[in-house]
Amino acid sequence: MAEFSRQQIAHELFKRYQGNPILTPENWPYPAHSVFNPAAAKLNTETLLLIRVEDMRGFSHLTVARSANGLTNWQIDPEPTLEADQSSREEKWGLEDPRIVWLEEQKQFGITYTSFSEGGPVVSLAITKNFKTFARLGALLPPEDKDACLFPRRVRGRFALIHRPIVRGEAHMWISFSPDLKHWGDHRPLIKTRHAYWDCHRVGLACQPIETPQG
């Protein structure tokens, strides 16, 4: 019988920062129960985080923190940057889990986030140039849906969105397309859960899509 040698090759894609955590509720300029799940972007020369902040009631909003080196000396907005619009049924229970991409065509940042509506979580979109003023485009798709992010440019002439709807109790990753960032269709599964594997219950997007030479 032939003998085969097994070589172990270490691929260190990430190295955990020894100074973690970089931000905690103790750093916050106003009362906060927990801070987590930030989206990240480069704005001018700074690293910018748009952070999910859970308040003392358990409702979430989004707050910006900025740092020159992305590690220390964070400058946190003195009050929530994006809060739920209490007059909107789409945002009744808060805003969660943002993701940011630079939309070259619009010369603006696109922020997808989860709005908790009366009917469950929905995918919403806001546009900004400076993270001080925002244009809210509202909910893109019906509930129950979350874990969404835009592709940074059009794919074959259309904008593309990865998201995770709950269909028949199944939580797969889907992709949808739009000509204008408002009207979405051509929905199709992208990555499905696998029966009897660690990802049998649900799969979802982590960070924004990253373009490589292969696609």
Image (cartoon, grey):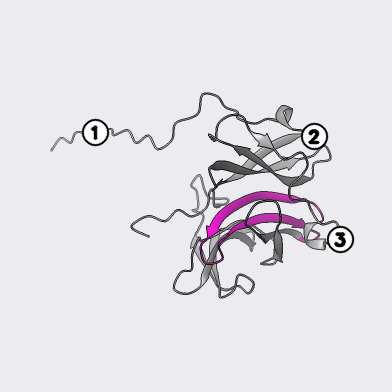
Please name whichever residue, 170 or 148, is drawn nearer the observer in this view of the structure. 148
Q: Determine which quarter of the picture holds residue 109.
A: bottom right
Q: Main secondary structure of the magenta part?
A: strand
Residue tagged 3: 87
Q: Nearer the viewer, mark 3 or mark 1?
A: 3
Please name whichever residue, 5 or 77, is drawn nearer the observer in this view of the structure. 77
Q: Measured from the top left, where is residue 80 in percent x and y?
A: 76, 44
Q: Mark 1 and mark 2: span between their CA atoms?
A: 52 Å
Q: Mark 2 and mark 3: span between their CA atoms?
A: 24 Å
Q: Nearer the viewer, mark 1 or mark 2?
A: 2
Please name whichever residue, 39 or 8, is drawn nearer the observer in this view of the structure. 39
- Dot 3 falls on a residue whose secondary structure is loop
On the question of residue 93 being in view, the answer is yes
Residue tagged 2: 30
Q: Is residue 5 left or right of residue 103?
A: left
- Mark 1 / mark 2, whichever is N-terminal: 1
- Circles 1 and 2, Cβ within 8 Å, touching? The answer is no
Look at the image and give the residue range highlighted in magenta. 92-119
Looking at the image, is 99 positioned above or below residue 5? below
Q: Is residue 3 left or right of residue 159?
A: left
